[in-house]
Amino acid sequence: MINKSKIWTIIQHEYLLKVKSKGFIIGTFLAPIGIVALIAFSASMMIMFKDTTERKLAIIDDTNMIGTMLAEVDTTKYYLSDETSKALKDKIIKQEIDGFVHIPSNIIEKGEVEVFSEGGGGIGFVSSLENNLSKIVRRERMKVMNADEEMIRLVESGVEVTTQKVTEEGTQHDNTQGMAYIGYILGFIIYFLVFLYGGLVSRAVVEEKANRIIEVIASSAKPFEIMLGKVVGIGMVGLSQIAVWIVLTSILVLSLGSIIGAFIEIDPNTLANGMSGQMAMQQAQDAKVAEIMSNVPQIDIGLIIGFIFFFITGYFIYASLFAAVGSAVDNEQDAGQLQMPLTIPIMIPIFMIQPIMENPDSTIASVASLFPFFTPILMIVRLASTQVPAWEIILAVLLQILTFVAALWVAGRIYRIGILMTGKKPKLTDLIKWIKM
């Protein structure tokens, strides 16, 4: 019989030990802020340096028109040259110029140009030139077809797609792209936490075994009780961290108005119309917040419940197996080698997230999200990205529970033998023998 009181004692010990640590406190309260700051910094860098380059290109223009337009786009990137191609190539070799672009006379018909440089230059070097030339050539092609300015403006305006979700209550805005990225974030969080806390379980077992503490604990509790207590205790640490992150995120969202207000400039015309600065600021802030919040994906309670469930089941599956591996070795180096077969199934779903975001209803997405070792990450991505059939969700839940029970049983068989064995590094074949014993 399993002694529940002993398991609870071990759970409390593991939970309090981890929660009181500096690493947990720093990671719990500073990590969300750091992640938000990192995302904001990365996004701002992408915006600031999109299609930028330090190189300046000379232009040989056979059309006597396109090159002039290109040079007028950005004089810091392009300038017209009347020198020959050979002369400019010599200058490139001598590093007197960065390079040059040759615009042929048939660019309108063929849409091809050549760029000559010493090589390299980064992505922005080519992409900025392609974007600038494409806009110019597109307009000139329409002019050749006798399109007037109104027609050109109409063609260049493009199309904006908005999606509407149809429900029994009516229609509502459906931010498909936003929810797909929410799914990516949630899936990555599950991957990160499962990997992190699964590793903590293994490390805790290895440390106690190396310090001979486990022999003392094993004298008063069964190996299975010890293992289950560790897995549950450290799992509760992960849930506590998620709860704090949710609260901090909610506070950040509620503070959005004040943050935006600090960056809003008041329209001088508003003050001229007799509106006070405070009132103008409040109206501008309210309007800006309303605009931003209308584009923020609305996360329903079902997705939150799914996230918690798949995190818990995914964690328990992997943490049980990590505990088993930790019990079989005497040091972390050996544990790392035996954990390789476990880390591969955690990492594979990360590489599958992008194609599943693109087509969450595909057969591959359905099958992969039902594979128990992939389910925690991939199913939450699908739940956020599309309407997953009810039978798939039910089947995924059942398979997760069954896999957890099987993982717990397998881990328990290994743990009961490995926890008291020292001096010999086991092989995978040894672990299989322990399971069969």
Image (cartoon, grey):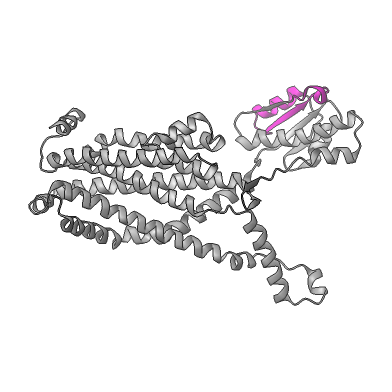
| Furthest residue in direction front, as rendered | 168
| Nearest the eye: 420 or 366 | 366
| Nearest the eye: 151 or 230 | 230
Residue at x 65%, y 32% (from the top left corner): 95
- Eyeballing the image, is 21 above or below 107? below
Horizontal side of residue 86 vs 218, given as left or right = right
Residue at x 36%, y 55% (from the top left corner): 239
Task: Give residue 350's quadrant in the image.
Answer: top left
Residue at x 41%, y 61% (from the top left corner): 244
Task: Give residue 19's quadrant in the image.
Answer: bottom left
| Nearest the eye: 426 or 93 | 426
Find residue 402 and report its horizontal and vertical position in percent. 31, 39
Find residue 10 and report its horizontal and vertical position in percent. 19, 56
* Residue 328 showing in the rendered view: no
Find residue 422 and report its horizontal and vertical position in percent. 10, 40
Residue at x 30%, y 32% (from the top left corner): 341
* Residue 130 showing in the rendered view: yes
Quadrant (top left/top right/bottom left/bottom right) for the C terminus? top left
In this rendering, the count of numbered labels is: 0
Find residue 81 and report its horizontal and vertical position in percent. 79, 32
207 falls in the magenta region: no
88 falls in the magenta region: yes
Which residue range is magenta in the image? 85-112
Horizontal side of residue 241 vs 56, given as left or right = left
